[in-house]
Image (cartoon, grey):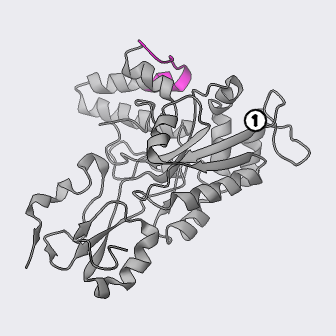
Amino acid sequence: MKALSGELDFQYKHITLNNYPLLKENEAKGGYSVLLWPTALGSNCAFMPNLNHKDPVLKALFNNKNFRIGLSYAINRDEINKLCYLGLAQPRHATVVPECPYYTPGLEKLYAEYDPKKANEYLDKAGLKKRDKDGYRLRPDGKPLQLTIEFTPSGEFGPWPDVVELVTKYWNAVGLRVAYKSMDRALFDIRRASTEFDIMVWAWGRGLTPLIQPVFIFPVITTTGAPLYAQWYSSGGKTGEKPTGDVLRAMYMYDRFKRTIDDAERIRIGKELVKLSAENAWSIGTVGLAPTPLVVKKNFKNVPQRSFYEWLLLQISNTNPEQYFIKD
């Protein structure tokens, strides 16, 4: 409302894409312009199962690659793009963008096809063949399978409540009894660092330079779906839980990546690491590369019409904001 009434000089955060049509319609009245800058979000809204869940049955299920692939195939990304992102995003897997030096062609299409039949096949492979009288899948131990998606309705990245509602519908359609819970950011930050949540939602970022801070390539910090694995890695094995399989392999690969002084070898390891991450689907993407709107008052000058919006560039800092000015 402040933007529409012309009260904002310059705003680049928490202006979501679903507000773009309304903002454009009121440009002249509000005395501002709306810019669209590209982003490097591999997935604007990604779903991350808790690999360290305190329930041993759910922990085993979430660590099962077939389960995560099944979840991915059940998502109708084209519909999400059309209904939630004005058709301006790209349906894709949660992985790096094509401009990334570690990109391998085709990674963004991995498990990204909407195919409920494949989804059901992979969920069966994960040990979820048995169903209750209502058609919902039972856990491998025979108990009812009930999952909750937890998220914060942050306005920074996009229309997450709408995306979460759709994904909940898709997963229920393949026999998973799924609900969702929205909560304040402060509580969400506590929950996603715990072993109690089932599936959390966050943006899959760092798509251009993922290995400067590889938080979305494998668990590095406690807020990306595997808090205990991240603790183990960041503490040098002093706390947390030592991972196995490809998670541990990814950690060792990254250590080699950091040590090598050979450029070609670093690119090779980087590509292998990004590919390993995508193939494991530790994060399940929806749509990515959605542009972000910026509101700029007519007398607020020197803001580029088009630039790049990326967290590791501190969003606008690559545009020399110290040279923005207000013209009387």
Residue, disc 1 = 125
Quarter of the picture holding the N terminus = bottom left
Q: Is residue 313 left or right of residue 278?
A: left
Looking at this rendering, what residue extends furthest in the right direction?
Answer: 133
Measuring 26% from the left and 79% from the top, which residue is drawn there? 32
Mark 1 is surrounded, within 10 Å at the Cα level, by few (under 14), some (14 to 19) or many (20 or more) other residues, namely some
Question: In the image, residue 61 lies at what x, y percent?
Answer: 68, 31
From the viewer's side, name the closer residue of 14 and 60: 14
Quick check: can you spot residue 252?
no
Name the amino acid type tagged 1: Lys
Q: Which one is nearer the viewer's eye here, 180 or 163?
A: 180
Q: Is residue 162 above or below residue 272?
A: below
How far across and down, in percent of the image, does residue 106 sit?
49, 50
Using the rendered image of the protein, determine whether residue 36 is visible from the camera's viewpoint.
Answer: yes
At 67% from the left edge and 36% from the top edge, which residue is drawn? 66
Residue that protrudes farthest toward the bottom in the picture:
29
Picture quadrant of residue 251: top left
Above or below, 297 against 230 in this view is below
* Left or right, 141 with reference to 251: right
Q: Residue furthest top?
A: 238
Quarter of the picture containing the C terminus is bottom left
Which quadrant holds residue 213?
Answer: top left
Q: Secondary structure at mark 1?
A: helix
Q: Which x, y percent locates residue 265?
A: 30, 29
Q: How many marks?
A: 1
**The magenta segment:** 238-250
